[in-house]
Amino acid sequence: MIVDDNERFLAVARDRLMRDGLDVVGTATSQKEALQLAEELHPDVVLVDISLGAESGFEVTRRLVADFPDLEARVVLISTRDQDDFADLIAASPAAGFLPKNLLSARAVRDLVGVADC
Amino acid sequence: MTNAWVAPALRRLGGLLAGAVLAVAWFAARARRDEHETARLSQEQAGQRRVATLVAGGARPREVFAAVSDEIARLLAPDLTTLVRFEADGSAGFLAGGGWRGGEMRVGRSIPVPPSLAPLRDGAVVRIDDLRRHPDMAETVEKQGLLGVVACPVFVEGRVWGAFGVGSRAGALPASTERRLVDFMELIGAAIANAESRAQVGRLLDEQAALRRVATVVARGAPAQEVFAAAADEVAAVLRADVACLIRADVPTMVAASGWDDAPIGVVLDRYPQLRTAFELGEPYRTDDLSLVPHEAEVLAGSGVRGLVATPVTVEGRFWGVLVAGSRSGPPPVGAEHRLVQFTELVGTAIANTESRSEILRLLAEQGALQRVATLVATGASSLEVSRAVAGEVRGLLGVADAGVCRFEPDGTAVLLVGIGDTIAQWPPGTRFAVDDMYSVSEVWRTGSSARFDAERWQQDIGAVGAQLRRLGVQSVVAGPVTVEGRLWGAVIAWSSGTSLPDDTEERMARFTDLVAMAIGNAENQAKLAASRARIVTASDEARRRIERDLHDGAQQRIVSLGLELRLAQAGVPDELPEVRAGLARVADGLADVLDELRETARGIHPAMLSEGGLQPALRTLARRAPVPVELDVATDARFPEPVEVAAYYVVSESLTNAAKHARASHVAVAVSARDGDLRLSVRDDGVGGADPQGGSGLIGLRDRVEALGGTIEVASPRGGGTSVVVTLPAADGQDRITSSRGR
């Protein structure tokens, strides 16, 4: 599942990951939607954009992991900004790691969450 | 591989490539525009900050006008600038400006306000895009070649004081002109208000010192002649008059003169000066040009005086003579006659007191007290300190048992700010009571004039506080209004037990309430100025944050998506077309570079980390990126108001840059803590030191930013001893609560 407020990116990312063999079961553009979809779809991995308009991706990550303990170390933070800009916050969050949006690929995601079968 | 596959794939590729090229071009244009916008904004705001710093530093209005003219010239490059003051007679006096042809406008020249510009007097902004359509401006078009004009009113203390205008000879001025001018007008207004209140206090101090000196001469029992001479000298000095003299009426004689060496002192005049006719009306008198009234000039013949003001001196109700202040260069300054009146009272008292000195001693004590309070006002003491001093002096001077200062609140209550004395002590400062609880206070509140309750009237004060005071034996209460810039702010109250307060208590109290009013007016101006500086800084940060966000949501997102699409396409290119694959890879790499550059630009505009996670992680990022090892100690994880966090961030960022670039430091220690709600920040390096604590555009920018938020910054940089920057930023709203009042 991907959470991002940019529709265009959602489309491209879904395309990219599907082609790599990852099944994108759903996309959300807000915290509310993300929590709803996680409830319905039980995704293995969630990609969360750090800058979700007025909302914060860190907060979304925290809520996701709190509500769905299975997602512990299964959330990947993504951003067009640099990892360095958020290093401390990423380290402090329950996310598995960070992926710059421009380097998005199924392999990179698998490497981060350390699972081969997702 | 079949052609059927290749053709659509190539078509798709072509589309993508075109998209990428377009995106790069779009990005470049966008970045140029953003850069331009950022540069323009920072230029504009730096200008406002420079002027605000000048105003806050107490610069004289003339310096501030010049600075504003410079900044506006830099921002708008108008052909012509003008600052005028509106005079009481409807004309406009030219104060500053540039670009006028043929010396048309000289400082001091007054002209009538043309109808086209008249709305300025009512506080409206005026824009004229083609002056040729305004017949009343024909002369300006002809002589100055002016076509476009934008002018804004300058407000001082809520009144239209004057106007600032810019003109263009090329045509209409740009649409943003009004907005940019208006931002500066507030600063000009604050500068003028500051200077006026400073000048007022300064004048008052001068006058009181002069009166005191004369009173001292009287008090030590000097002969009348010496008192007269002292009075003439002080009048000349305080009014900056070329000549001052005292003429008695019974036997027409000039008894003292200052600034006129061969004055006919003691010589009985053949004829008493015709001036007398005016004095018999008991009014101050003014002649701007003595040559037009030769019979009046006789008495001053040989003094070279061209214009004069004079006031009658009355001794114990009788006309005694006149006090004259003359100017050799032309008309005496506006208001000189009113200031002269103050001296005639003293001179009159001095003359009357050759027998009894008690009155003069009392006056001396009062002048001393007034001077102490005025000095406090002049040094910028808070209104609370001044209130305390006034309550103390009123109590000591007027022989009252208790004295206090209270402030009216909009809801019909009064808050006791200060109270000195035994009975008033049972109401601690800050006590709030309804004005009707004390009839004297309520009368001041209703009428705006002073109120007295004693004898029978006092028995009628059945308000809660009044009744309680009566039970405590209070017999007489006087309350006087404190009026700040035309609105009723509060009251000074005094009471005594035993006897009624003397008849002149109200009058003597009024001299002190004026000083309280002045102190409060000053404090309000300072608060307004501080708010305006803070607004400038906040607006600038807000704009930068918006630009960073736009860059992120727009260009950066789009480039990332394009990059991903390109890589998708790249993966789909058959192995038989390696050059296509390589070409695509190059474009994708190029896009990645563009993205990196864009991130760097965005980071320089505003640290996104700050809005996201607060100061601590943002400073960690700064420390990590610094070219010098940084030891970071953040002893608080509290969040502060955004302007405070942004300021702290820039202080550290700028200091780290300086440590690496100029100080050649090998280690920097950064410490952040929260104390009493304030943010305290220090940056110390082990570099070469020797930085100019006042200088360097970076440090000045930081100082502006910190001071605009009401904070302090101290830079120490001994040569060879490293550099330390210590900053305190108030996190709470630092506005002086005392300045709120009923008028709001």
Image (cartoon, rainbow, N blue to C red):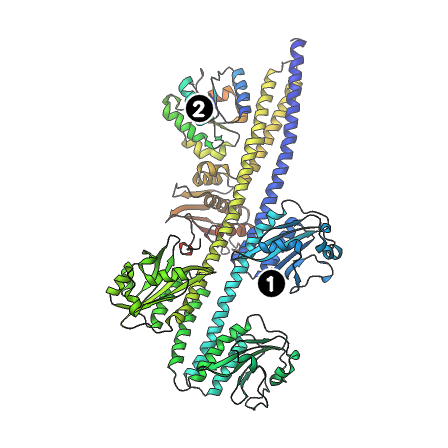
Residue at 45 percent across and 63 percent down: it is B518
Where does residue B735 sit, x and y in percent of width and height? 43, 52
Residue bearing the label numbered 2:
A34
Q: How far is disc 2 from disc 1 in space, using C-alphas?
A: 67 Å
CA neighbours of label 2 inside 10 A, class few (<14), some (14 to 19), many (20+)? many
Q: Is mark 2 on a helix, strand or loop?
A: helix
Same chain assignment for discs 2 and 1: no
Q: Is residue B388 shown left or right of residue B42?
A: left
Q: Is residue A25 shown left or right of residue B132?
A: left
Q: Which image quarter holds the N terminus of chain B?
A: top right
Q: Which of A82 and B295 is in front in this view?
A: B295
Q: Nearer the viewer, residue B260 or B41?
A: B260
For the question of whether residue B403 can be seen, the reply is yes
Where does residue B117 sit, x and y in percent of width and height? 65, 54
Q: Is residue B517 shown left or right of residue B464?
A: right
Q: Report the chain holding disc 1.
A: B
For the question of whether residue B401 can be seen, the reply is no
Q: Which of B211 and B17 is in front in this view?
A: B211
Quarter of the image where one finds residue B215: bottom left
